[in-house]
Image (cartoon, rainbow, N blue to C red):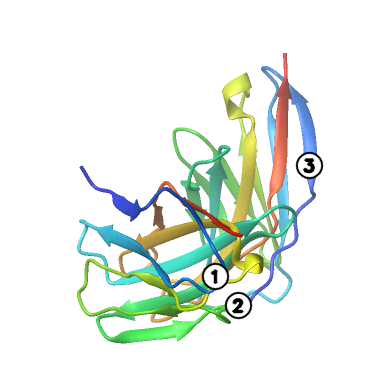
Amino acid sequence: LAKTTQPISMDSYEGQEVNITCSHNNIATNDYITWYQQFPSQGPRFIIQGYKTKVTNEVASLFIPADRKSSTLSLPRVSLSDTAVYYCLVGDSGGNNRLAFGKGNQVVVIP
Amino acid sequence: EAQVTQNPRYLITVTGKKLTVTCSQNMNHEYMSWYRQDPGLGLRQIYYSMNVEVTDKGDVPEGYKVSRKEKRNFPLILESPSPNQTSLYFCASRDTGEQPQHFGDGTRLSIL
């Protein structure tokens, strides 16, 4: 089961681009990389998912290098409401629901 | 509305008194999971299920039981709760393939 490692916390100013990294050295061939956002006392909410290279949606981009041992979530022009804990998750999209969240990265957006 | 519903949202109880936290999803998802969240430890998977009558242990299964008799329901059972099971619990479901998880709003359990 692939483990993930993230920085514990980071601060950013409103309006800046924020890049959040995740290390997953023992990622398996079938594993996808998924990022979630969690506000206090709420369940995590899906942000973006990818397998390799770059994925972009309306809220974020996900960059995955060729070796797939790490990934970077990029949030463009953050606002105060982006203050949350961000989790990366590596798991098998096939027949296995065995999933391991890391400890998450607390992002604080400063006015 | 597509959702995962957990009940109760909050519960304070005493050591040894059996309790069940219910989880229901209305999206016809195959996969369901239970997680606990503790300060500084992130989310840890307790049990998961890949279909009706198919369940397996996650990272921290000790002291918990689950059942999956129907596709929509995945209750978490604490037969003899202890204070170290005081935590915030989340149920999640997802479809097969590379589909993301949908989480419930959480259940905060306090075992005295």
Disc 2 residue type (three-letter): Asp
The percent position of residue A67, horizontal first and vertical second, equals: 69, 68
Residue B20 position (above or below residue A11): below
Residue at the far top in the pictured view: A111
Q: Report the residue marked by disc 3.
A: A9
3 vs 1, front mark: 1
Residue B31 in sight in this render: yes
Residue A39 or residue A74, whichever sits in front: A39
Q: How far apart are marks 3 and 1 (CA)?
A: 22 Å
- Classify the position of the C terminus of chain B by image quarter: bottom right
Q: How far apart are marks 2 and 1 (CA)?
A: 5 Å
* Helix, strand or loop for disc 3: strand
Q: Answer with left or right where residue B27 lies relative to residue A93.
A: left
Disc 3 residue type (three-letter): Ser
Residue A99 or residue B79, whichever sits in front: B79
* Helix, strand or loop for disc 1: strand
Q: Residues within 10 Å of mark 1 (few under 14, many from 20)?
A: many
The chain carrying label 2 is B
Q: Report the residue marked by disc 2.
A: B59
Q: Answer with left or right where residue A92 lies relative to residue A95.
A: right
